[in-house]
Amino acid sequence: AQKVTQAQTEISVVEKEDVTLDCVYETRDTTYYLFWYKQPPSGELVFLIRRNSFDEQNEISGRYSWNFQKSTSSFNFTITASQVVDSAVYFCALTKYSSASKIIFGSGTRLSIRP
Amino acid sequence: GAVVSQHPSRVICKSGTSVKIECRSLDFQATTMFWYRQFPKQSLMLMATSNEGSKATYEQGVEKDKFLINHASLTLSTLTVTSAHPEDSSFYICSARAQTSGGSYNEQFFGPGTRLTVL
């Protein structure tokens, strides 16, 4: 069975602070994909990143960075120099390698950035 | 990226009525569409997977007679909430996956969601 755990329910930081959102996953598959999505108050999901299980390289995109560690089954997301616009719910998710597979979402972390 | 639309974006209905929500892939053909439900402050929970031209596959605990899914074309899937009750009030999100093309991953694109309120 597949499972995604986001232990941090809510995080609140002051603007310009760095913040890391944790994600731990469980799967018996050797090949899989991991995702991060952002859900602002409007409700529409915004795709942030997809990472396949073969690629453990860390990724950086502007103020966002992701740390994928297969050894600990973690795929953590860091926002550097946070901004108020980063306030949203962030979901980590997992799917099998098969194109037909469904995406399993974690419970989400509600991030609030205070001015 | 590819665009998925949902209509309506928001609907309020009386208890006992049926509500239809449309999900369209605007610039690609989707052989598979997914329907999710999200209650306030909760995660997205998959309700069903539908493949064009065949019956939908429902997740455990989802009543197929209550949540009717039709995927009649490669660009349209509909979710009908029959005899809606206040506990069906939720945010319904669809997603669409493009036709498979070789071994590469086929992205799943999400719609903007439909907020259903049943009075």
Image: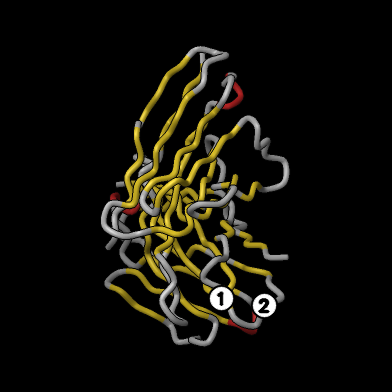
Tell me which amino acid carries mark 1. Answer: Tyr
**Residue drawn 45% across the image and 63% down it:** A36
Q: Is residue A91 above or below residue B112?
A: below
Question: In the structure shown, which secondary structural element does the residue marked by tag 2 occupy?
Answer: loop
Q: Which residue is mark 2?
A: A29
Q: Which residue is mark 1?
A: A97
Give the left or right position of residue B78, taking residue A103 as reference.
left
Q: Quadrant of residue A101?
A: bottom right
Question: In the structure shown, which secondary structural element does the residue marked by tag 1 occupy?
Answer: loop
Which color mode does the image show? secondary structure
**Residue drawn 57% across the image and 55% down it:** A8
Q: x, y (%) of residue B78?
A: 45, 39
Q: Do badges 1 and 2 share one subunit? A: yes
Chain of the residue where label 2 is placed in the rendered structure: A
Mark 1: few/some/many CA within 10 Å (<14, 14-19, 20+)? some
Q: x, y (%) of residue B98?
A: 40, 64
Question: Which is more toward the observer, B110 or A106?
Answer: B110
**Residue drawn 57% across the image and 14% down it:** B16
Chain of the residue where label 1 is placed in the rendered structure: A
Tell me which amino acid carries mark 2. Answer: Asp
Give the label on residue A108, or none: none
Q: x, y (%) of residue B70?
A: 50, 41
Q: x, y (%) of residue B30?
A: 40, 58
Mark 2: few/some/many CA within 10 Å (<14, 14-19, 20+)? few
Give the CA separation, mark 1 to mark 2.
Answer: 8 Å
Count all numbered tags in the image, as a single digit: 2
